[in-house]
Image (cartoon, grey):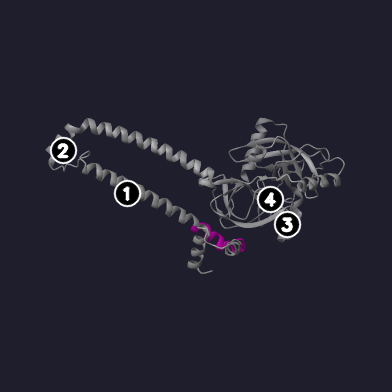
Amino acid sequence: MDDILLLQAVERYMKGEMSAQEKAFFEELRKSNPEIDQAAVEHTFLLNQLDKHAETKAYKHSLYEVAAKLTAEGVMSESPLKGKAKVVSFWKKYKRNIAVAACIAGLMSITTAGLIIAYTQKVNQSNKEDLIGKIQNTNRELDKLNNKLQSGPATNPVLPQNPDYRATGFLIDGKGYLVTNAHVVNRLKSVYVENARGEYFKAVSVFADNNSDLAILKITDTAFKTVLNLPYSIRKNNLDLAEQIFTLGFPRNEIVYGEGYLSAKSGNDGDSTAYQLTVSVNPGNSGGPVLNKNGEVIGIITSKEKNADGVVYAAKSMNIFKLLDAIKKMDDTQTIKLPNNSGLKGLDRPQQVKKMEDFVFMVVGN
Protein backbone atom coordinates (compact mmCIF):
# COMPACT_ATOMS: atom_id res chain seq x y z
CA MET A 1 0.00 0.00 0.00
CA ASP A 2 1.28 3.52 -0.86
CA ASP A 3 2.55 5.37 2.23
CA ILE A 4 0.31 8.40 1.68
CA LEU A 5 -2.75 6.22 1.13
CA LEU A 6 -1.90 4.26 4.27
CA LEU A 7 -1.65 7.42 6.39
CA GLN A 8 -4.92 8.69 4.98
CA ALA A 9 -6.55 5.34 5.75
CA VAL A 10 -5.27 5.45 9.36
CA GLU A 11 -6.67 8.96 9.87
CA ARG A 12 -10.04 7.98 8.42
CA TYR A 13 -10.07 4.86 10.62
CA MET A 14 -9.31 6.89 13.78
CA LYS A 15 -11.98 9.51 12.97
CA GLY A 16 -14.60 6.83 12.27
CA GLU A 17 -15.03 7.96 8.68
CA MET A 18 -14.76 4.47 7.16
CA SER A 19 -17.76 2.47 6.14
CA ALA A 20 -18.29 -0.87 7.87
CA GLN A 21 -16.92 -2.69 4.81
CA GLU A 22 -13.83 -0.45 4.61
CA LYS A 23 -13.20 -0.83 8.33
CA ALA A 24 -13.42 -4.63 8.17
CA PHE A 25 -11.08 -4.72 5.15
CA PHE A 26 -8.55 -2.40 6.83
CA GLU A 27 -8.52 -4.43 10.06
CA GLU A 28 -8.05 -7.67 8.14
CA LEU A 29 -5.20 -6.08 6.16
CA ARG A 30 -3.47 -5.11 9.41
CA LYS A 31 -3.78 -8.62 10.77
CA SER A 32 -2.31 -10.18 7.64
CA ASN A 33 0.51 -7.65 7.07
CA PRO A 34 2.73 -6.85 10.11
CA GLU A 35 4.48 -3.96 8.30
CA ILE A 36 1.21 -2.18 7.60
CA ASP A 37 0.03 -2.85 11.16
CA GLN A 38 3.21 -1.39 12.67
CA ALA A 39 3.01 1.66 10.40
CA ALA A 40 -0.59 2.17 11.49
CA VAL A 41 0.36 1.91 15.16
CA GLU A 42 3.23 4.39 14.77
CA HIS A 43 1.08 6.89 12.86
CA THR A 44 -1.65 6.60 15.50
CA PHE A 45 0.87 7.52 18.21
CA LEU A 46 2.15 10.42 16.05
CA LEU A 47 -1.35 11.84 15.62
CA ASN A 48 -1.98 11.58 19.36
CA GLN A 49 1.28 13.43 20.08
CA LEU A 50 0.36 16.17 17.57
CA ASP A 51 -3.00 16.62 19.27
CA LYS A 52 -1.28 16.97 22.65
CA HIS A 53 1.18 19.51 21.20
CA ALA A 54 -1.69 21.55 19.76
CA GLU A 55 -3.43 21.59 23.14
CA THR A 56 -0.22 22.80 24.85
CA LYS A 57 0.25 25.62 22.33
CA ALA A 58 -3.35 26.71 22.76
CA TYR A 59 -2.90 26.78 26.54
CA LYS A 60 0.27 28.91 26.26
CA HIS A 61 -1.50 31.28 23.87
CA SER A 62 -4.34 31.77 26.36
CA LEU A 63 -1.79 32.62 29.09
CA TYR A 64 -0.17 35.24 26.83
CA GLU A 65 -3.58 36.80 26.15
CA VAL A 66 -4.39 37.00 29.88
CA ALA A 67 -1.00 38.64 30.59
CA ALA A 68 -1.53 41.20 27.82
CA LYS A 69 -5.01 42.02 29.12
CA LEU A 70 -3.77 42.53 32.68
CA THR A 71 -0.99 44.80 31.42
CA ALA A 72 -3.44 46.86 29.37
CA GLU A 73 -5.74 47.29 32.41
CA GLY A 74 -2.85 48.40 34.61
CA VAL A 75 -2.96 45.39 36.87
CA MET A 76 0.50 44.43 35.63
CA SER A 77 3.25 46.79 34.46
CA GLU A 78 6.23 46.33 32.21
CA SER A 79 8.70 49.07 33.17
CA PRO A 80 11.79 49.04 30.95
CA LEU A 81 14.98 48.65 32.98
CA LYS A 82 18.08 50.53 31.81
CA GLY A 83 21.29 50.79 33.71
CA LYS A 84 22.59 49.46 37.00
CA ALA A 85 20.93 52.13 39.17
CA LYS A 86 17.45 51.38 37.86
CA VAL A 87 17.99 47.69 38.41
CA VAL A 88 18.99 48.26 42.04
CA SER A 89 16.10 50.66 42.58
CA PHE A 90 13.66 48.21 41.06
CA TRP A 91 14.95 45.39 43.26
CA LYS A 92 14.67 47.45 46.47
CA LYS A 93 11.15 48.51 45.58
CA TYR A 94 9.76 45.18 44.55
CA LYS A 95 11.98 42.60 46.26
CA ARG A 96 9.21 41.56 48.69
CA ASN A 97 6.72 41.12 45.87
CA ILE A 98 9.30 39.25 43.81
CA ALA A 99 10.10 36.93 46.71
CA VAL A 100 6.41 36.16 47.26
CA ALA A 101 5.90 35.63 43.54
CA ALA A 102 8.93 33.34 43.40
CA CYS A 103 7.61 31.28 46.32
CA ILE A 104 4.21 31.02 44.68
CA ALA A 105 5.79 30.11 41.35
CA GLY A 106 7.97 27.47 43.01
CA LEU A 107 5.01 26.03 44.87
CA MET A 108 2.93 26.00 41.67
CA SER A 109 5.77 24.33 39.77
CA ILE A 110 6.10 21.59 42.39
CA THR A 111 2.33 21.11 42.57
CA THR A 112 2.01 21.09 38.79
CA ALA A 113 4.86 18.60 38.44
CA GLY A 114 3.22 16.34 41.02
CA LEU A 115 -0.12 16.56 39.24
CA ILE A 116 1.49 15.87 35.88
CA ILE A 117 3.32 12.80 37.23
CA ALA A 118 0.18 11.50 38.93
CA TYR A 119 -1.93 12.20 35.86
CA THR A 120 0.62 10.59 33.56
CA GLN A 121 0.75 7.46 35.68
CA LYS A 122 -3.04 7.36 35.81
CA VAL A 123 -3.33 7.83 32.05
CA ASN A 124 -0.68 5.19 31.37
CA GLN A 125 -2.53 2.71 33.57
CA SER A 126 -5.95 3.64 32.16
CA ASN A 127 -4.67 3.06 28.63
CA LYS A 128 -3.84 -0.54 29.51
CA GLU A 129 -6.48 -3.23 29.29
CA ASP A 130 -6.22 -6.48 31.22
CA LEU A 131 -6.92 -9.49 29.04
CA ILE A 132 -8.95 -11.60 31.43
CA GLY A 133 -12.16 -12.72 29.72
CA LYS A 134 -15.60 -12.18 31.23
CA ILE A 135 -17.70 -15.30 30.64
CA GLN A 136 -21.25 -14.69 29.51
CA ASN A 137 -23.14 -17.29 31.50
CA THR A 138 -25.80 -18.19 28.96
CA ASN A 139 -27.53 -21.56 29.11
CA ARG A 140 -25.56 -22.64 26.05
CA GLU A 141 -22.24 -21.85 27.78
CA LEU A 142 -23.21 -23.74 30.94
CA ASP A 143 -24.53 -26.71 28.97
CA LYS A 144 -21.20 -26.96 27.16
CA LEU A 145 -19.29 -26.93 30.43
CA ASN A 146 -21.57 -29.57 31.94
CA ASN A 147 -21.22 -31.78 28.86
CA LYS A 148 -17.44 -31.63 29.16
CA LEU A 149 -17.69 -32.53 32.82
CA GLN A 150 -19.96 -35.53 32.16
CA SER A 151 -17.80 -36.86 29.33
CA GLY A 152 -14.55 -36.46 31.30
CA PRO A 153 -13.06 -38.82 33.88
CA ALA A 154 -15.15 -39.59 36.96
CA THR A 155 -12.43 -38.06 39.12
CA ASN A 156 -12.90 -34.60 37.61
CA PRO A 157 -13.82 -31.95 40.21
CA VAL A 158 -17.21 -30.28 40.38
CA LEU A 159 -17.00 -26.99 38.51
CA PRO A 160 -18.00 -23.76 40.24
CA GLN A 161 -21.52 -22.59 39.50
CA ASN A 162 -21.53 -19.94 36.79
CA PRO A 163 -17.77 -19.29 36.40
CA ASP A 164 -17.20 -15.56 35.87
CA TYR A 165 -13.78 -15.31 34.24
CA ARG A 166 -11.60 -17.09 31.71
CA ALA A 167 -7.85 -16.68 31.17
CA THR A 168 -4.80 -18.75 30.24
CA GLY A 169 -1.95 -20.49 32.04
CA PHE A 170 0.81 -22.93 31.09
CA LEU A 171 2.90 -25.54 32.86
CA ILE A 172 6.40 -24.68 34.04
CA ASP A 173 6.83 -27.89 36.04
CA GLY A 174 5.32 -31.25 35.14
CA LYS A 175 4.20 -31.76 38.75
CA GLY A 176 1.34 -29.34 38.13
CA TYR A 177 2.82 -25.86 38.56
CA LEU A 178 1.52 -23.24 36.12
CA VAL A 179 2.15 -19.56 35.39
CA THR A 180 -0.66 -17.07 34.81
CA ASN A 181 -1.27 -13.38 35.62
CA ALA A 182 -1.57 -11.95 39.12
CA HIS A 183 -4.60 -9.92 38.05
CA VAL A 184 -6.29 -13.19 37.10
CA VAL A 185 -5.61 -14.86 40.46
CA ASN A 186 -6.59 -11.72 42.37
CA ARG A 187 -10.10 -11.86 40.91
CA LEU A 188 -10.76 -15.54 41.55
CA LYS A 189 -11.75 -17.13 44.86
CA SER A 190 -11.91 -20.57 43.27
CA VAL A 191 -9.61 -21.59 40.42
CA TYR A 192 -9.96 -24.44 37.92
CA VAL A 193 -7.85 -25.26 34.89
CA GLU A 194 -8.87 -27.17 31.77
CA ASN A 195 -6.50 -28.99 29.43
CA ALA A 196 -6.88 -29.55 25.68
CA ARG A 197 -8.77 -32.81 26.31
CA GLY A 198 -11.50 -31.03 28.27
CA GLU A 199 -10.39 -32.29 31.69
CA TYR A 200 -10.83 -29.91 34.62
CA PHE A 201 -8.61 -29.79 37.69
CA LYS A 202 -8.79 -27.76 40.90
CA ALA A 203 -5.86 -25.39 41.40
CA VAL A 204 -4.65 -23.04 44.13
CA SER A 205 -2.46 -19.94 44.08
CA VAL A 206 1.05 -20.53 45.41
CA PHE A 207 2.47 -17.04 44.91
CA ALA A 208 1.50 -13.80 43.15
CA ASP A 209 3.60 -10.74 42.33
CA ASN A 210 1.61 -7.65 41.35
CA ASN A 211 4.71 -5.78 40.13
CA SER A 212 5.41 -8.26 37.33
CA ASP A 213 1.70 -9.26 37.16
CA LEU A 214 2.62 -12.94 37.38
CA ALA A 215 1.37 -15.74 39.61
CA ILE A 216 2.15 -19.41 40.19
CA LEU A 217 -0.71 -21.93 40.40
CA LYS A 218 -0.52 -25.51 41.63
CA ILE A 219 -2.93 -28.24 40.46
CA THR A 220 -4.11 -30.05 43.58
CA ASP A 221 -6.29 -32.81 42.07
CA THR A 222 -5.02 -36.36 42.41
CA ALA A 223 -6.49 -37.02 38.95
CA PHE A 224 -3.72 -34.92 37.41
CA LYS A 225 -0.86 -37.01 36.08
CA THR A 226 2.68 -35.70 36.31
CA VAL A 227 4.29 -34.75 33.01
CA LEU A 228 7.86 -36.01 32.77
CA ASN A 229 9.20 -33.72 30.04
CA LEU A 230 7.83 -30.37 28.95
CA PRO A 231 8.75 -29.73 25.29
CA TYR A 232 9.70 -26.05 25.74
CA SER A 233 12.22 -24.13 27.84
CA ILE A 234 12.08 -20.80 29.71
CA ARG A 235 14.41 -18.13 28.32
CA LYS A 236 16.62 -16.27 30.81
CA ASN A 237 17.83 -13.39 28.63
CA ASN A 238 16.18 -10.75 26.45
CA LEU A 239 14.84 -11.28 22.96
CA ASP A 240 16.10 -9.16 20.05
CA LEU A 241 13.99 -6.46 18.47
CA ALA A 242 11.86 -7.60 15.50
CA GLU A 243 12.17 -11.31 16.32
CA GLN A 244 9.13 -13.36 15.33
CA ILE A 245 6.95 -14.71 18.16
CA PHE A 246 3.77 -16.75 18.54
CA THR A 247 1.15 -17.08 21.27
CA LEU A 248 -1.34 -19.67 22.48
CA GLY A 249 -4.33 -18.77 24.64
CA PHE A 250 -8.02 -19.02 25.35
CA PRO A 251 -9.95 -15.96 24.16
CA ARG A 252 -12.49 -18.64 23.15
CA ASN A 253 -13.46 -22.04 24.57
CA GLU A 254 -10.80 -23.60 22.39
CA ILE A 255 -7.12 -22.82 22.13
CA VAL A 256 -6.26 -19.98 19.73
CA TYR A 257 -2.94 -19.39 17.93
CA GLY A 258 -1.50 -15.95 17.14
CA GLU A 259 1.74 -14.72 15.62
CA GLY A 260 3.59 -11.42 15.51
CA TYR A 261 6.92 -9.85 16.43
CA LEU A 262 8.76 -8.02 19.20
CA SER A 263 8.19 -4.31 18.57
CA ALA A 264 9.94 -2.85 21.66
CA LYS A 265 12.29 -4.17 24.34
CA SER A 266 10.33 -2.45 27.11
CA GLY A 267 6.70 -2.42 28.10
CA ASN A 268 4.20 0.27 29.01
CA ASP A 269 5.84 3.56 30.03
CA GLY A 270 9.34 2.10 29.56
CA ASP A 271 8.83 -0.86 31.91
CA SER A 272 12.09 -2.83 31.60
CA THR A 273 10.51 -6.01 33.02
CA ALA A 274 8.17 -6.33 30.04
CA TYR A 275 8.12 -6.40 26.24
CA GLN A 276 5.92 -4.62 23.73
CA LEU A 277 4.62 -7.00 21.07
CA THR A 278 2.69 -6.54 17.88
CA VAL A 279 0.21 -9.42 17.82
CA SER A 280 -3.55 -9.94 17.89
CA VAL A 281 -4.96 -10.83 21.35
CA ASN A 282 -8.34 -10.64 23.08
CA PRO A 283 -9.79 -10.98 26.59
CA GLY A 284 -8.93 -14.51 27.71
CA ASN A 285 -5.32 -14.33 26.49
CA SER A 286 -4.08 -13.14 29.89
CA GLY A 287 -1.40 -15.48 31.22
CA GLY A 288 -0.73 -17.11 27.85
CA PRO A 289 2.82 -18.00 26.81
CA VAL A 290 4.79 -16.09 24.19
CA LEU A 291 7.37 -18.22 22.36
CA ASN A 292 10.10 -17.60 19.82
CA LYS A 293 10.83 -19.71 16.75
CA ASN A 294 13.04 -22.10 18.78
CA GLY A 295 10.23 -23.02 21.17
CA GLU A 296 11.53 -20.97 24.10
CA VAL A 297 9.01 -19.16 26.32
CA ILE A 298 10.14 -15.54 26.18
CA GLY A 299 7.18 -13.86 27.88
CA ILE A 300 3.69 -14.03 29.35
CA ILE A 301 0.80 -11.95 27.97
CA THR A 302 -0.42 -9.39 30.53
CA SER A 303 -2.35 -6.56 28.81
CA LYS A 304 -2.83 -4.53 25.66
CA GLU A 305 -3.00 -0.85 24.73
CA LYS A 306 -6.56 0.45 24.51
CA ASN A 307 -5.83 3.26 22.06
CA ALA A 308 -3.66 1.36 19.57
CA ASP A 309 -4.66 -1.90 17.93
CA GLY A 310 -2.06 -4.65 18.03
CA VAL A 311 0.06 -3.13 20.83
CA VAL A 312 0.39 -5.85 23.48
CA TYR A 313 2.48 -6.10 26.64
CA ALA A 314 4.09 -9.26 27.98
CA ALA A 315 6.05 -9.83 31.18
CA LYS A 316 9.56 -11.08 30.35
CA SER A 317 10.19 -14.76 31.07
CA MET A 318 13.11 -13.90 33.35
CA ASN A 319 10.48 -12.77 35.87
CA ILE A 320 9.55 -16.44 36.36
CA PHE A 321 13.01 -17.09 37.81
CA LYS A 322 12.53 -14.16 40.21
CA LEU A 323 9.19 -15.59 41.32
CA LEU A 324 10.79 -18.94 42.08
CA ASP A 325 13.50 -17.23 44.14
CA ALA A 326 10.80 -15.42 46.14
CA ILE A 327 8.88 -18.66 46.69
CA LYS A 328 12.03 -20.42 47.87
CA LYS A 329 12.71 -17.69 50.43
CA MET A 330 9.11 -17.86 51.62
CA ASP A 331 8.80 -21.67 51.70
CA ASP A 332 11.80 -23.86 50.90
CA THR A 333 9.57 -26.96 50.76
CA GLN A 334 8.16 -25.76 47.41
CA THR A 335 10.47 -27.28 44.81
CA ILE A 336 9.72 -26.14 41.27
CA LYS A 337 12.00 -27.35 38.49
CA LEU A 338 11.84 -25.44 35.23
CA PRO A 339 12.37 -27.22 31.88
CA ASN A 340 15.88 -26.72 30.52
CA ASN A 341 15.75 -27.88 26.90
CA SER A 342 13.31 -27.14 24.11
CA GLY A 343 12.09 -30.07 22.06
CA LEU A 344 10.38 -27.66 19.66
CA LYS A 345 13.56 -26.34 18.03
CA GLY A 346 13.80 -27.20 14.34
CA LEU A 347 10.13 -28.20 14.00
CA ASP A 348 7.74 -26.39 11.69
CA ARG A 349 5.09 -24.25 13.36
CA PRO A 350 2.13 -26.69 13.17
CA GLN A 351 4.26 -29.39 14.81
CA GLN A 352 5.44 -26.95 17.49
CA VAL A 353 1.86 -26.00 18.32
CA LYS A 354 0.73 -29.63 18.31
CA LYS A 355 3.40 -30.59 20.86
CA MET A 356 2.78 -27.45 22.92
CA GLU A 357 -1.00 -27.22 23.22
CA ASP A 358 -1.39 -30.07 25.75
CA PHE A 359 0.49 -27.96 28.30
CA VAL A 360 -1.47 -24.71 27.87
CA PHE A 361 -4.56 -24.54 30.09
CA MET A 362 -7.72 -22.51 30.28
CA VAL A 363 -8.04 -20.89 33.71
CA VAL A 364 -11.64 -20.40 34.91
CA GLY A 365 -13.28 -19.47 38.19
CA ASN A 366 -15.26 -16.94 40.15
Q: Between marks 2 and 4, how big is the CA–CA gap?
A: 71 Å
The magenta segment: 28-43
Check contact, mark 3 vs mark 4: CB within 8 A. Answer: no
Q: Pointer 2: residues within 10 angstroms few (<14), some, or many (20+)?
A: few
Between disc 1 and disc 4, whose residue precedes?
Answer: 1
Q: Between marks 3 and 1, how big is the CA–CA gap?
A: 59 Å
The secondary structure making up most of the magenta span is: helix
Tell which of 109 and 150 is nearer to you.
Answer: 150
- Residue at the spot of label 3: 352
Q: Pointer 1: residues within 10 angstroms few (<14), some, or many (20+)?
A: few
SS at circle 2: helix
Residue 219, given in percent of the width and then of the height, sits at: 76, 39
Q: Pointer 4: residues within 10 angstroms few (<14), some, or many (20+)?
A: many
Tag 3: amino acid: Gln
- Residue at the spot of label 4: 251
Tag 1: amino acid: His
Between disc 2 and disc 4, whose residue precedes?
Answer: 2
Q: Which label was assigned to residue 87?
A: 2
